Image (cartoon, rainbow, N blue to C red):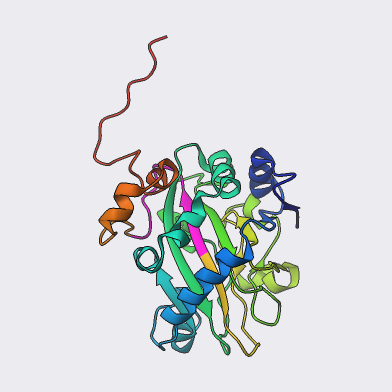
C-alpha cells in the first residue's frame, strides 16, 4: 500500500489512490509522540469500564463490550485537542480533494479494541453500510464518485497480532457489499502502522477490524468524512461544548456543518 509523508504529500495523489488505486493510503508521522501520548492517556482512562459501546459490525454481544468507544462530544470534553487532530493539513487537504472543498465530518470516535475481541465481519461504511439491500438504493448507484472518506489516527501500534484493520485493495472500484464468495481474507492486506500515522481509505472498500490476540488493547481514532450534502451518521452538535463551538477554527466549523446549514436557501451562482 502506498504511503506519503510531509515531504512528498500530494492531496490530489491521495484522492486518486483512494478512488482508482488500492482504496487506501498511509500518511506517515502526521502527529508527534507527545501529542498522541496525551490523547492515549485520556482515552485509556475513559475506556477502563466494561460497558457496551461497540460497533454495529461486531459479531457478538461480547465483542460489543470489548470494542470500547468514546464518541465525539465526549472526546471534546476530555480534550478539545483530540478533535483538533482533524485540522491537520494532510488530513484536511486530502479530504478536500476527495470529497469537495466543503466536506463535513460524519462521525468521530476513539475505539479501544480489547484483548479477546473477535473481530468484525467484512463490510463497507455509511452511507453504503446497508448496500446488501441494493434495491433500496437508486438505480445505477456506483462508486465512480465518493460519498465517504475514512481516517484512522493510530494511537497504539496497529499489528497483525492486535487486530489491525484488514482491507481488500481495489474493492472500492465496484460498489457492492462483500459476501462469503468473495473470500475477503484471502485477498486482504493489513493496515499496519505506528502511533502518529494516519490511514485514509474510501469506505466503499471492503474492510473490517480483526481479532485482537495480543495481551493489550489497541486504540485508534476513527473518523468518517462525507460530502456536504450527506446527512452525518452521528449527532455532532447536541451537547457539544459551547466554548468549543465559539472558538472553532474555520476548518472545524466546516467539518461540523456550520458552513452548509439546513434548512437553507441555495447560494446564488455567479452572474458572469
Which is nearer the eye, 85 or 37? 37
Quarter of the picture containing the C terminus is: top left
Q: Nearer the viewer, residue 91 or 268?
A: 91
The image shows residue 200, relative to residue 260, as above or below, that is: below
Q: Nearer the viewer, residue 132 or 147?
A: 147
Report the residue at 66% width, 73% height from top: 158
Picture quarter containing residue 25? bottom right
Q: Is residue 176 left or right of residue 135?
A: right
Q: Is residue 140 visible?
A: yes
Q: Which residues are magenta?
A: 222-234
Q: Is residue 128 visible?
A: no
Residue 208's image quarter? bottom right
The answer to whether residue 157 is left or right of residue 127 is: right
Q: Residue at x 26, y 62 (%)?
A: 239
Position of residue 256 measured from the top left corner of the image (x, y, whole percent): 37, 49
Image quarter of residue 1: bottom right
The tally of labels here is 0
Q: Is residue 225 magenta?
A: yes
Depicted 54 relative to depicted 28: above or below: below
The chief SS type of the magenta part is: loop
Q: Position of residue 221 (x, y in %)?
A: 52, 66
Instruction: Give the x, y percent position of residue 55.
Output: 45, 74
Residue 159 x/y as whole percent: 70, 76
Direction top: furthest residue: 272
Lateral position of residue 87 relative to residue 233, left or right: right
Residue at 44% in and 38% down: 102
Of residues 12 and 247, the one nearer the viewer is 247
Amino acid at each position: 500500500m502506498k504511503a506519503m509523508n510531509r515531504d512528498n504529500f500530494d492531496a490530489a495523489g491521495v484522492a486518486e489512490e483512494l478512488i482508482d488505486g488500492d482504496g487506501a493510503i498511509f500518511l506517515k508521522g502526521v502527529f508527534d509522540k507527545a501529542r498522541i501520548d496525551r490523547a492515549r492517556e485520556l482515552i485509556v482512562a475513559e475506556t477502563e469500564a466494561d460497558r457496551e459501546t461497540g460497533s454495529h459490525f461486531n459479531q457478538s454481544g461480547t465483542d460489543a463490550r470489548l470494542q470500547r468507544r468514546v464518541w465525539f462530544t465526549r472526546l471534546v470534553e476530555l480534550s478539545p485537542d483530540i478533535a483538533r487532530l482533524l485540522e491537520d493539513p494532510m488530513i484536511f487537504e486530502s479530504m478536500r480533494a476527495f470529497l469537495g472543498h466543503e466536506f463535513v465530518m460524519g462521525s468521530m470516535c476513539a475505539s479501544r479494541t480489547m484483548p479477546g475481541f473477535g473481530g468484525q465481519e467484512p463490510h463497507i461504511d455509511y452511507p453504503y453500510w446497508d448496500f446488501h439491500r441494493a434495491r433500496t438504493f437508486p438505480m445505477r448507484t456506483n462508486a465512480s464518485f465518493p460519498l465517504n472518506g475514512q481516517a484512522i489516527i493510530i494511537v497504539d501500534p496497529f499489528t497483525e497480532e492486535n487486530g489491525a484493520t484488514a482491507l481488500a485493495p481495489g474493492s472500492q472500484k465496484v460498489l457492492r457489499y462483500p459476501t462469503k464468495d468473495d473470500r475477503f481474507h484471502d485477498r486482504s492486506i493489513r493496515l499496519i502502522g505506528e502511533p502518529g500515522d494516519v490511514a485514509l481509505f474510501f469506505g466503499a472498500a471492503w474492510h473490517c477490524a480483526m481479532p485482537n490476540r495480543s495481551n493489550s488493547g489497541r486504540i485508534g481514532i476513527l473518523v468518517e468524512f462525507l460530502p456536504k450534502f450527506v446527512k452525518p451518521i452521528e449527532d455532532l452538535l447536541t451537547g457539544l461544548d459551547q466554548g468549543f463551538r465559539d472558538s472553532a477554527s474555520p476548518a472545524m466549523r466546516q467539518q461540523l456543518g456550520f458552513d452548509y446549514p439546513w434548512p437553507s436557501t441555495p447560494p446564488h451562482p455567479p452572474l458572469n
